[in-house]
Image (cartoon, helix red, strand yellow):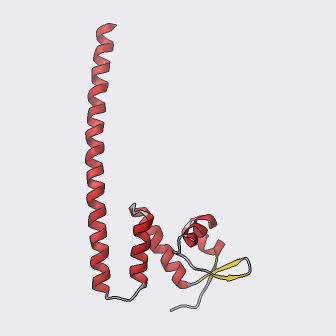
Amino acid sequence: MSNKTWSISELAQEFGVTPRTLRFYEDHHILNPIREGQKRIYTHRDRTRLKLALRGKRLGFPLSEICSLIDMYDGPGSTDTQLKTYLDALQKHKSQLLQQKADIEQTLAEIDYQEKQCFALLQHHS
């Protein structure tokens, strides 16, 4: 493992986030930088945890689930168990998103229908 460390601005720049984002993840115990006075020093572990947190965010996971998945990755355990837990989380999240997509499509179809009704009524009254 590398002994390389990063400052808050270096890590923020590398991942295209703001220092405020890093402090947010620190407040939620995802990142745990070494402190030298006011200066934060991020380790390889912090960098990996940030990468996982941002991936979870991109996938739309809630913060609580991101935290538990990262902690699982960080803790002891077999890779198979970790992969199965992650796969379960992905499948559950995918199912929720597919349901939301179906709900949105149904709502959009209803809006289309209502729009057509309004246009027809407007034409009729013209």
Q: Where residue 88 sits in the image (x, y, percent)? A: 27, 71
Q: Does 47 appear above or below 110?
A: below
Horizontal side, residue 57 vs residue 39: left or right:
left
Q: In percent of the image, x 42 and y 69: which residue is there?
A: 66
Q: Quadrant of residue 70?
A: bottom left
Quadrant, the C terminus: top left
Q: Spot the residue most to the top.
A: 126
Q: In percent of the image, x 40 and y 60: which residue is there?
A: 60
Q: In percent of the image, x 26 and y 28: which residue is there?
A: 113
Q: Does 10 appear above or below 81?
A: above
Horizontal side, residue 13 vs residue 123: left or right:
right
Q: Quadrant of residue 62?
A: bottom left
Horizontal side, residue 110 vs residue 33: left or right:
left
Q: Nearer the viewer, residue 43 or 66?
A: 66
Q: Quadrant of residue 57?
A: bottom left
Q: Where residue 80 sits in the image (x, y, percent)? A: 27, 84
